[in-house]
Amino acid sequence: AAPDILVLQGVDWDFEGRALRALSDGLDRPFPYVFSQQPNTGVATDFDMDGDGRRFGPRDAQGYGTFRGQGGMAVLSRYPIRTKQARAFSTILWQDIPGAALPTRDGAPFPSADAQAAQRLSSVAHWAVPIETPDGVLTILAWHGSTPAFDGPEDKNGKRGGDEARFWQLYLDGAFGPVAPNPVVIGQSNIDPNKGEGQRAVMARLLADARLQDPTLLRAPTVNWPQTGPMRASYILPAAHLRVTRAAIEPRIPEASRHSLIWADIIP
């Protein structure tokens, strides 16, 4: 695929970035610029975050993980990354975003008021990463949303994933400060707008947002899960004013991943 900018999911984070650099250096064409920050995966809390009556398990972290940084995100680029201007929104509390769809059980906050007050929105991360391309700055709005499964009727994971996707509309509204130039929303929401357990209506509204475009060729399955079959879970949504010349989904390599690589050629 030979991308100029690559957003990877499921990449373990370490403090000095050695794993990410080693991954890049192992490619046929290493990327000269890489970006990653600590994700919420494996960041321990003092609370029972999943309501199973126990604490300190992988689901009691801010994002699922058996150790801090498990399964994070990374941005790799052939063009300079403006690291000092990058913004991470990963510590924003779920309850603090406008219109938060917080879970309840029997009319009470789930799993508890204390746990809910400590819960961050991002299960992995939300980043705005500006990159200097030859045609101008492009800002990658990267995220990885919660899976909508593995919970109960309170639908904590589903509601969280919906708000994680809706975050970008709030960002474009200016709810979290100035909107960076030439944004491209890119990542894995884990929500198919037409089927599955996720907040389908939320994803459909993001895809229909007039400030973004959904390249026609990408409206197809991007993952094949044994439990659900083919679904659309990953997205590239450039700002509406950007020119998209081509877009496609690469054939999935079963021995490598359940997910397909999706790409778009974008001109700022």
Image: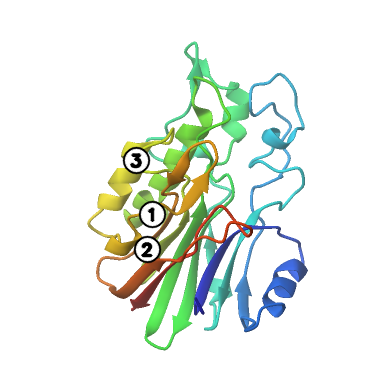
Residue under numbered circle 3: 202
Where does the image place residue 137, in percent across and percent down from the top left? 41, 79
Amino acid type, callout 1: Tyr
Residue under numbered circle 1: 171
Q: Nearer the viewer, mark 3 or mark 2?
A: 3
Query: Whole-Å distance between the Cαs marked 3 and 2?
Result: 21 Å
Circle 3 crowding by C-alpha within 10 Å: few under 14, some 14–19, many from 20: some
Q: Residue at x 32, y 49 (%)?
A: 206
Residue under numbered circle 2: 179
Which quarter shows the C terminus? bottom left
Q: Name the foreground residue: 263 vs 152.
A: 263
Of callouts 3 and 2, which one flags the residue occurring earlier in the amino acid sequence?
A: 2
Q: Is residue 172 visible?
A: yes
Query: Whole-Å distance between the Cαs marked 1 and 2?
Result: 7 Å
Where does the image place residue 119, in percent across and percent down from the top left? 59, 36
Of callouts 1 and 3, which one flags the residue occurring earlier in the amino acid sequence?
A: 1
Amino acid type, callout 3: Val
Q: Residue at x 69, y 38 (%)?
A: 61
Looking at the image, is 175 positioned above or below residue 153?
Answer: below
SS label for mark 2: loop
Contact? badges 1 and 2 (CB < 8 Å): yes
